[in-house]
Each structure stands twice: as C-alpha cells, then as structure tokens.
C-alpha cells in the first residue's frame, strides 16, 4: 500500500501548485523567479487563501489558529481520529526578494503527499496534518520561526501577536486585516511526529549528485559581537610603531577565525564560522581606525567545536590586548543548542528512499527551520532536496521539478510509515 | 645681531596672540582646548580681522589677495624693497573640532619673529613677509591647501573661488561675505624662501625629548581603493569549503599590508600604510560578505617603498583571485610625489638651533602642509615642535608654551639668516 501511495505522487500537480503559489508577491526579475511574501500583506492573504482552498479541495478539514498557523487535517481510512497525528509542512512566507521553493515546497509537498495517500486508499492508524507555520523568515516582525515557536510553546500567542513591524503595526493587526487571525493555538506537542521537506540552500547534494538529504540534525550556533578599540590617529604622521590600529588588529582575528573553522571543519564537515558584519571607525581614508566592531556567527551540529572556536577567539583577543595595546570586548549574544532529528524520522525517510530506489545521504542543516522547534516537543525529521548552485533567498533559488517530486515521494513513504500502515 | 633678534622673541606675547586667536570658534570642551574655524564663517572673519589688526599694530603693510591669502610685509632697515622676500607663515583655519596650535602657531609665530627682528634693529638685505594661507585643512570646500595652491600656481583663483561647500555656497561668496575677497594673487614664486613652523602631530619629538624637528621632506603618498568580490551566501548552510568570502580574503590583505609596511619602516623609519576605511556587504550577522571595499593610504619620503608596497598588494590580489576565486579591482586614486625641503632652509634652522643651544633633530613630515606646495616654486623649509601624545586635529592637541617659544626663536634665527643679515 505504501508503494501505491508513493506512486500516486503527481509531480505535475505539485508543480502546478508551486507555480500558482509563486504568483503571489511575484517579482519582475530578468533571471530566475522570485517572490516577496511577508506576513500580513496582501500577497500573504492571497497566498494563504489559495492554500486553504487547495486543502479543502483535497477534502481536508482546515483550521487557523490565533497566530495564523494553518492546518489541514486528513483522517485516513482505518485511522483513529483520537490518535496523535503525524504532521508535515513548512511555511509560505518568504524573505524579501526570495525564491519560490523555500517554504512552499514543504507545505504543498505535504498536501501532495496526503492527496497521494488518499488516492491510494491506504489504510493508516493516525491522522495526518498538513501545516503552514506563520512567519518563519522573520523579516517583518523582527523575530523568526514565530508560528512554530507558538505551536511549541516557546512563545506565547500574546507575545507573537504584539510583535510590531517597522511601521508600528502589530502582527495581530496584520493577521486581522488579512482575515487570518483564527482561534485557539496549534499544539505541536499533540503530534506523534512532524516531517519537513525543504530546499538544502547549500551545494552538498548537488555536488554529491544525490537527490535527497536525510537531515541528521540542525546546527547549534553562537553569535557574538566583538569590539576592538585602539587609537584614532592621522595616517600620515603616526609611524607604524606609534599606532594602535583597531582594524589591523581585527584583520588578524578575522583571518584566524576563518583558518580555525576551516581546520575543524576538515575533520567534522559540519563547522562554519563567519564574520558577516564589520565596521571600522571613523572610516576615513587618511585616518587610522580607532575602533572596529564585528560579528561572529559560529555553527556546528555539536556544541564542543563551537566552544572551541569561541575559546580560541578569547585567547586571541587577550593576545591582541597584550601585543597591540588594544582593548577588546566580546559580547556573546546568544547560543542555540544543536537539535538532532529523531531517529524514527530519519529511519522512515531512509526506508522510503530504499524502497523507492531514490538515492539519499545523511546531511546536516546549518540553518534553523520550523522542524527545529518542533523537535523540542516531539519527534521531528527533515528531508533536503538539492538547491542549484546552493542558491536560496534569491530569485535564483532553484530545485529541479524531478527533484521536488522525488523528495515528496520520500515524504509520502515516510508519512505512511509514521502514520502506521 | 641675529642673537639679539632671537633673544627678543617674547614667548608671553606669542602666547597671548595664540590664546586670543583660540577664542574664535572656541569649543566648549571638558578636556583640552579646541576651535572650529572654517573658511568663510563668522569665526573665520573675526580670526582674520584680528590677525590683520596685529600685523598692522606691528607696523607691517597688509594685503589680502583674491582668495583671501593675507600677507603682512616688513622691510627691515637696510633691506632692498625690490629684493625677493623671505616669507614665513601657515594657516588660521582649522578642522572641525580642531586644536589651537595647528596653523596659528606658524602664522603668529612668524609675526612674533618679525616683531623680534624689528625690535632688535637688525639690518637685513631682504623684506620679510608673514603669510596666512586660506583653507589649508579643506573641510569646507572639499579640497585642501587652497590658498597655497593658488599662490604657487597649481590652482587658478577662478577654480578656487568656484569651489562650493555642502550648501552650494562658493568660496567666492564666503570670502565676500566676510570681507576677505581681496585683489590680485599672492605669488609665492617671488619669494626667496619660505619657512613654516608647525606642530608635529606625531610623537617622535616627544619620545626623543627633542624640542625641534628640522623637516627633511614631506612624504609622498599613494591612495587606492580596492574592491574584492566573492559570493554572498548564507552563513549557516554554506560550508567552509563552499564559500567565497570577500571579507575573509580582505582580512589577509589588510594584515599583509600592515606587516609589510612595518617591515619596510623598520629599515627606513619613514614608511606608513593604512587601511582607513573598510565596508563589508551586505553586512548582516548571518550572511557571508559577497563584497568588501577598502582604502589604502601609503606614504614615504621616497617613491620606491610606496611602489614596492603597491606591487606587493597587486601580487597578493592576484594570489587571492587564484586561491580563493574572488575578483579584485584596484583603483589607484592618485599619487603625490615626495617633496624634499630645501637644504638652504634646513641649514638655516640647524645653524639657528646650534647658536641658540636648542636641541633639534631631523624629521620627516607624513602629512602635507602649505610649505609642501611652496617647495614646488621656491626654497621651502619646515620646523616641527612637539605635540603632546602626538595629538592633533582634536581639542587635546597641545604643545608646551616653552616649546612654542623655542620653535619661534629658531624661526627667528633662520629668517634673519635667509633674509641676509
């Protein structure tokens, strides 16, 4: 029966859904295909309304919670309606000028999987819920993963609804205006498990020539801000031995961070460290910078290498103080623990891949996703499909339609397994 | 007779002049003593009017040229009024929130020297001219050394007068408003020689415990802008081996420039290279910078080490392209040749120092001054006095009054020598 459900996945129907969804907030771009769908906007309203229509057209019961999370519920033949459901989904919002796959593939893919399961007549033990979480990207209200944070209890609905955008409008007002301020709160703790299909946003699958990546875990991360203070001086009259150049001191640290992350990553394959933002003050061509401020973002699937890099940074800062006479301040902004994906979910994907004859490999996720928060309350799993050139958050984001279909076939197989054939 | 002139230098009178001048555009600061005197402002008017009063009170003939350069002429007993004059001076304008010595010491010091020479009754062969050049700092009209550029023919008075400030007002309008748009053009070519006393703006004299620095030359410089382009990517999902980080590439170059300049400076003592401005784009904590732009300012008293550093930068850029896959563009903005000070002027200062028993040493200037432009048309010399902690362009700029007096005593001795005792 699983095989029939997997075979019933209709790539053309999935593609039609994704292409129709891509019209909302569509960008006029020369290359690629982009969209901007920010929560509470007209594009978001139309995007959500069509999704609800499609859920209902497939015979699912739709509910919308207080923060706009949308759930379509399917009770398969033979299932116990009281049993904890297996869920699958992702998000429909995008970053500004984002791509058409990041989020919608996981949402419409879950719907396609349910349609395929339904078409196969497969008898299962548990209900299946298709979910679209509100505001995963976080570009409007300043915080990301809002819908899944509320559904997993890490944020209250009141906190979420009180978030304001740049114009001072609250999320509550935005959701009310577009008609998606619903009732109750989606409770992810009630789920047996949750699966999310997402584009990789990196090049590992493409380079390996493998269409599916079974996510082992989501990297933890530490972010910090560092300020190095030297002395602002005249670039002409201050000799090389007289200056305390904050930027030159910073440069050695930026190089050192990259070199160390590379070295550790050579062993692990999961380590990244990035200096993304750097400002030198006062920033004039003929003035030695007296201050430099920069950020460091360190990620790994384990905390130990993150801490190792952070300790090396602290040691280097002390050395810079001693050797160069600068003052340094390291402000650790926050740390997010790594999140392993549930073995049950990884196994379900792996068995589905084996059965369908679709190549897969283990992969980690360097970025956060809704499933990361869900993993704190129930079993969660993720499947990555290849991103052309690793592009994402851009109109150049692309996943071949065949890869989309293969991914949803694996999702279908895994969902039927987890919902108990 | 020279000795009597030198002995007639009145440090208290000089100090009174400098302190009175410091009132124009005075800042209300907690520490130090600062002023803002930008060309064409009310502070500039009052500053200039008092200077003219003081020139006239000393019996000098005053003229103001089209671009506001002010000259007070003294014809000593026995001098041929038709002989080329020996000049001395500097500028009265300041940077925004600048110090009280940078410029005025050279202007009022020249006046004090003339008063001392006059008081001594010294017979000399040539007239002496005390000069204040318009807009040396260049913070209002976008170009520096305006007055001396016009006086040396490197800029026409029409070009200078047409310069506009941020509000669109021309220098001509500014000078007319304050009543300092005069007649004719000061011609530095007519001078036999020109001497400028200035604060060092570095720490070499202070560290050496020497009150006077006889400037051997003014550094040449090259400025360039470099752009390094990599790929903007997600800091979490892009592995260390997948990224083309423009900022990490830049950091190695910034470190390399500092290290090379230090090495060359160890041999020469005159080499500096500075990365003063650096911007990383897009500049987000979780995004790998796809582009970095920065500036390099390289100076030395000879062109060869400047070119050597520039060639090393070009070689390093090629290596970064080959090793890291970045694209690089180096835009050489301009090059200013080093300017040696005339032997005649250096000798005059050295002899004066020997006779007065004031310690002196040779020193180079890393920054441009009015005398740098004058050196292109006649003999020019500079004398530096110590800057406490090397501070300048700041209310913390300070030179002890005794050092000011010693500097002007040396100027007096050098002027009487050059004017032909």
Image (cartoon, coloured by chain):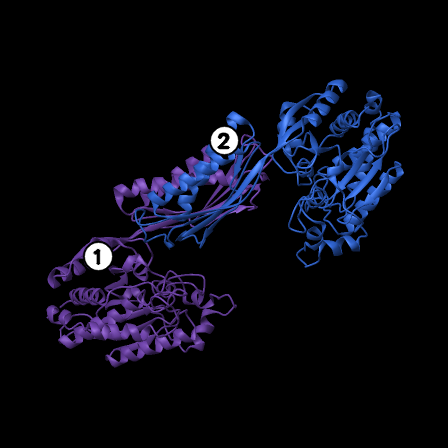
Chain colours: A purple, B blue
Residue A58 drawn at (x, y percent): 23, 79
Name the side, left or right, on which A49 lies relative to B404: left
Label disc, if present, on residue A74 of the rendered structure:
none
Name the side, left or right, on which B381 lies relative to A351: right
Secondary structure of residue under mark 2:
helix
User: Which residue occupies 15% across, 69% down?
Assistant: A6
Q: Is residue B90 visible?
A: no
Residue B311 location, quadrant: top left
Residue A174 drawn at (x, y percent): 45, 73
Seen from the viewer's position, the closer of residues B52 and B233 is: B52
In this view, B129 is above or below A55: above
Chain of the residue displaying label 1? A
Seen from the viewer's position, the closer of residues A91 and B378 is: B378
Chain of the residue displaying label 2? B
Seen from the viewer's position, the closer of residues B238 and B200 is: B200
Using the numbered discs, state the Cα–Cα distance from disc 1 to disc 2 in whole angstroms: 52 Å
Secondary structure of residue under mark 1:
strand
Considering the image in quadrants, where does the C terminus of chain A appear? bottom left
Residue A346 drawn at (x, y percent): 20, 57
Disc 1: which residue: A214
Disc 2: which residue: B262
Residue B134 location, quadrant: top right
User: Which residue occupies 15% across, 62% down?
Assistant: A352
Considering the image in quadrants, where does the N terminus of chain A appear? bottom left
Name the side, left or right, on which A324 lies relative to B48: left
Seen from the viewer's position, the closer of residues A311 and A201 is: A201
């Amino acid at each position: 029966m699983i095989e029939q459900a997997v075979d019933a996945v209709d790539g053309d129907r999935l593609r039609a859904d994704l292409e129709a969804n891509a019209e909302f907030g569509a960008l006029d771009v020369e290359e690629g295909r982009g969209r901007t769908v920010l929560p509470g906007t007209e594009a978001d309203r139309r995007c959500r309304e069509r999704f609800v229509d499609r859920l209902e057209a497939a015979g699912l019961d739709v509910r919308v919670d207080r923060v706009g999370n949308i759930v379509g519920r399917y009770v398969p033949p033979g299932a116990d309606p009281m049993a904890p459901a297996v869920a699958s989904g992702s998000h429909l919002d995008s970053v500004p000028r984002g791509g058409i796959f990041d989020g919608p593939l996981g949402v419409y893919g879950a719907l396609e999987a349910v349609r395929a399961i339904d078409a196969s007549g497969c008898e299962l033990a548990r209900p299946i819920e298709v979910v679209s979480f509100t505001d995963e990207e976080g570009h409007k209200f300043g915080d990301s993963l809002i819908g899944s944070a509320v559904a997993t209890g890490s944020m209250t609905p009141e906190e979420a609804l009180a978030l304001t955008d740049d114009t001072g409008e609250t999320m509550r007002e935005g959701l009310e205006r577009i008609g998606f301020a619903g009732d109750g709160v989606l409770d992810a703790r009630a789920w047996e498990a949750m699966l999310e299909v997402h584009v990789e946003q990196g090049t590992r699958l493409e380079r390996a020539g493998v269409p599916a990546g079974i996510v082992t875990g989501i990297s933890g991360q530490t972010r910090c801000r560092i300020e190095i203070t030297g002395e602002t001086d005249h670039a002409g009259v201050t000799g090389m031995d007289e200056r305390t150049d904050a930027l030159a001191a910073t440069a050695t640290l930026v190089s050192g961070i990259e070199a160390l992350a590379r070295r550790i990553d050579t062993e692990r394959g999961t380590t990244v460290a990035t200096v993304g933002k750097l400002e030198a003050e006062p920033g004039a061509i003929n003035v030695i910078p007296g201050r430099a401020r920069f950020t460091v973002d360190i990620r790994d699937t384990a905390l130990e290498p993150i801490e190792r890099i952070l300790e090396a940074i602290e040691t280097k800062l002390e050395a810079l103080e001693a050797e160069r006479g600068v003052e340094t301040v390291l402000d650790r902004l926050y740390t997010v623990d790594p999140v392993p994906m549930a073995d049950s979910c990884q196994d379900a994907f792996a068995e589905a891949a084996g059965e369908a004859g679709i190549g897969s490999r283990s992969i980690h996720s360097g970025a956060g996703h809704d499933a990361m928060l869900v993993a704190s309350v129930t079993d969660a799993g993720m499947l990555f499909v290849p991103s052309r050139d690793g592009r994402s958050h851009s109109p150049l984001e692309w996943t071949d339609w065949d890869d989309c279909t293969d991914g949803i076939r694996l999702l279908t197989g895994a969902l039927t397994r987890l919902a108990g054939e």
